[in-house]
Amino acid sequence: MSYEPYPANSHPHPPHLTYPWLPPPPAAPPAAAPSRAPQHPPLGHHSDLRILRTAYRWQRRVATLAALGYFVLFLVLSAFAPGFMAGTVADGLPVGLVLALAQLPVTWLAIALYEYTAHRYVDPLARRIRRQAEVDAKRAGHGGVTGR
């Protein structure tokens, strides 16, 4: 049976007086000097984070719908319009084959659209939030944001 000393708050005497073999409790840290309150709300409550999440969500949706939307259209036409897909474009080249080969350029277009929206909308928001976080960290005395 092991013997546990009383917790510090439940006994009327400090544990270092009652149990001399225990080290004395650590001294309370010195009170921090009052600092100037930041003029901006903390980053965790920043509305820019909500705006960034929304922009990123739209970016993903647009790129996904561009690539998958074309593929679903191709599948629906293959299943429900076989006569159209079997038709020829020129010199015996079937429409279905042309649409299947167009899948690669459509995918490239979706990637280009994703990159464009990232550079145009999402990246500037992320840069602005990062700069604001660095300013907030310097004001709080942390020296900056690490881990980029």
Image (spheres, rainbow, N blue to C red):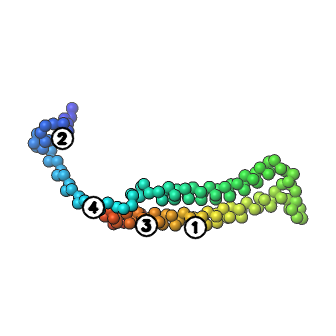
Q: Is residue 128 visible?
A: yes
Numbered disc 4: secondary structure: loop
Residue wearing tag 4: 35
Distance of mark 1 from mark 2, alpha carbons? 59 Å
Q: Which numbered disc flags the more N-terminal residue, 2 or 4?
A: 2
Q: Nearer the viewer, mark 2 or mark 4?
A: 4
Residue holding disc 1: 120
Mark nearer the N terminus (2 vs 3): 2
Q: Nearer the viewer, residue 42 or 81?
A: 42
Quarter of the image where the C terminus is located: bottom left
Which label sits in the foreground, 3 or 4?
4
Crowding around mark 1 (Cα neighbors within 10 Å: few <14, some 14 to 19, many 20+) is few
Marks 2/4: CA distance?
32 Å
Where is residue 130? Give x, y as percent.
Answer: 44, 64
Question: Residue placed at 61% from the left, 63% from the top?
Answer: 114
Residue wearing tag 3: 131
- For disc 2, the marked residue is 8
Residue 19 visible in the snapshot: no
**Label 2 with label 3: CB-CB less than 8 Å:** no
Q: Position of residue 36 (x, y in %)?
A: 29, 62
Dot 3 falls on a residue whose secondary structure is helix
Separation (CA) of disc 2 from disc 3: 45 Å
Foreground residue, 92 or 63? 63
**Residue at image location 77% in from the left, 58% down from the top:** 100
View extreme (top): residue? 1
Three-letter amino acid code of the residue under disc 3: Arg
Secondary element type, mark 1: helix
Q: Quadrant of the N terminus?
A: top left
Amino acid type at mark 1: Arg
